[in-house]
Amino acid sequence: MSRLPTKLAEIRQKGNKLVKSKELETEVPKDLCWHDEDFASKVPNSMDLKQQLIIWKRTDFLLNNVAFTTKLCHELVDLDVCTLQTMTDIQSKAYNAEKVLLLITRLGMHGTDIYSKFIKALFRSDHIKVAREIIKTEKQTKFGEMLPPTFTYFLDLSEFLRIYPHIGLKLGEEGKHLLQSYIEGKIALEAMKRDERVKILEREMEDLRRKIRELQAIIEGQKKFVEEARRRLEEAELRVSKLLKRIEVLENEADCREREIRLLRTAKEELEEGLIMVLKEGKDYNLERPPSRVSAPLDCVKEHYSLRILRSYIRMNDTKLQLMQQQFDKIVCEEKILNEIVAIAPRDPGSARSSAGGRKRSTSTRMSSVLNSPKKTLQELRREKKTLELNIREIESDTAARRKQAGEMESSAPLGPEEAIHEPISSRIKKLSETMRKSHKKELRDCQYRNMLQIQEMERKMEILRAAHMEEAERLKARIRQKMNDIHRREQLHKRLKHQIRTMVNYQAKNMNATVSVEECRRIVRALIQEARLLRAMAEEREIDSNQVQFCNLPDEIYKMFTFLLQMKALEGLPALQLRKKKQRRKKQRLAASLSDEKLEYLSFKITDKWRYVGEQLGVTHNRMDMIEMDIPLSVERQTLTMLKSWRDEDGGKLNELVEALIECEFDQYVGLFMPPDHAAHVMEKKKKREKEEKELDEILERTVMGDDYGNNNENKEENDEFIENKESDIVKLPPIVAVNA
């Protein structure tokens, strides 16, 4: 540390000599590219004190984030090399070789690589004398020795002078006062920035609390849904219990029916005994019981009654025949008598009448009629006899026909009419009880079968409902677990933010001043990005609204210069319509390519949800997919690549849809993992051809729109174009700390 003032003095002397040398070109207003208004206003003539303080105020962020430091330094150095203003600035009084070396040193421990790149850029841009002077200064000054081993920050001047007394000897009263005011200004600036950060973090914490409340409300709703499902399951179990009770009631009813059958059987036995007694005693009185309507079927009963009617007709005909035969016999006797009378009687009726006058009068009218007119009476008897003969023949024929019919009916009866009709009461009661038992058993079996079907249906529905509830419960558990993990992650982030706020509030001044250079780097990066946007706007010939452009604390000279350039380019006229349309298409492609994280999320969504069926067909298990989905600590790109590799391992020859999605999302670098080599080569060749066309278009636009004034030679145009093309994507890829206030 003892060599520090001597080295600073040597650097200042060499820088002054370099400024006064005749080899330098014309000057350009200071702070044109590297903007630091605070120091320019406070320390206009002494650069060594500021440079020394800047070296001391290096931040842990640049040391701990080597990749970001290297990237930031590369962008800054490239832009300084590739712009006209910076080249003239390096040769001015304010931006001499000493400041360039201090600038490179303050950007991080990896300044050697940046230093070599910067020197090579100077040689390529024909600034050979400046490069040689910087190399000479660097050889004489070892910046590693200038950096203190511990970066100490101070609250007041007394502490600073106590630790570094050799610097205090070199400072006068004015220098001490200047240093004290510089420290106080930086502390006030850091306090202001700290308050802004505290407000931002508090707003973020409020958002996190609101999200936690929303997730808790969702969890409550899911709990209510689970309770409703549990209630429905209880209702189903209650219905099943009611059905079981109904089955028990039916079984009890069956028992009651069995008891009734036993009672009927007992009554049947008693009735049989009574009927047997009645039948035995009724034979003495010629009692016949009527035929039963239950023992025989209806046809048998009809045949029985028909047979009885026929037998009645036969008996009636027999009776008629007997009566008519008796009458016929009487007529025959009378006929014989009349024949005898006619034979005995005289021929003369008078003589006969006179001879018979003295006799007694007969009581019989027939005899009187016979005596009066015997021939006439005999004729009547003969007619009556013929009539009786005819009637007898008819009755005999009718009786024969009816007897034949009765014989046929008796022969056609299956059990005989008497046996079928006159069945014993015991057999009829037995058949009745058997029929009732069978019907009751059939009814009971039907009821049991229906109940069994209902129970099986209810059990099946219960199983389906239980499986659905279990599946829904598992989904809810997984969803709740994921939400709880999100809540836990947000709570941890909330705690970290609270800890950061508490730490920022309670930090000492050294911790407050630790972000000074970070804020300067942010401001510088914003200024450079804005310059790149303005240059792109000029290249695309679009109008820029003054309200939409933020110059990020650029000086008035730069604002006026860019305004003048825009006006001049507007007067030059528009390029060809086809070139402009092609440029617009390239702009859309670049904007689409810059959204890499969103495309990866879209691809991840398509793989997890839309292609789950394809995954099942290929054999990808759910556990594997769920494991990949729940791997929260991985970034989006890493998570998506893991999922793609898992699909590639299962079957790489059937994922045509995946390849189409990759091409659609412009992830050509992953196409080779999922398609044949010839197809992958075709895709890569197409991509190279497109890049070549874009490069040619960039060269045409560079020559047409921006002209040869921008840059010092043609070698820097390619670097300029690459910087302008990738600037928007670089905005997305900045670390979160830079993006907070950007």
Image: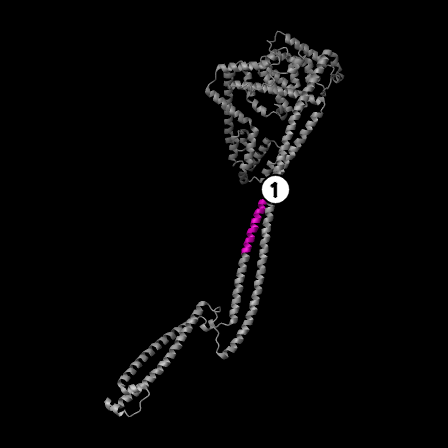
Residue 416 makes an appearance in the image: no
Magenta stretch: dominant SS?
A: helix
**Where is 557 relative to 645, above or below?**
above
- Quadrant (top left, top right, bottom left, bottom right) of the C terminus: top right
Q: Is disc 1 surrounded by few (<14), some (14 to 19) or many (20+) residues within 10 Å? A: few
Q: Residue at x 54, y 56 (%)?
A: 449
Q: Position of residue 482 (x, y in %)?
A: 62, 37
Please tell me in which quadrant of the rendered image residue 134 appears: top right
Residue stretch in magenta: 450-473
In the drawing, does residue 171 fall left or right of residue 678? right
Please tell me in which quadrant of the rendered image residue 394 appears: bottom left
Q: Position of residue 83 (x, y in %)?
A: 57, 15
Q: Residue at x 49, y 14 (%)?
A: 571
* Outermost top residue: 22
Q: Which residue is mark 1?
A: 224
Q: Which of the pair 138/729 is nearer the observer?
A: 729
Identified by mark 1, the residue type is Lys
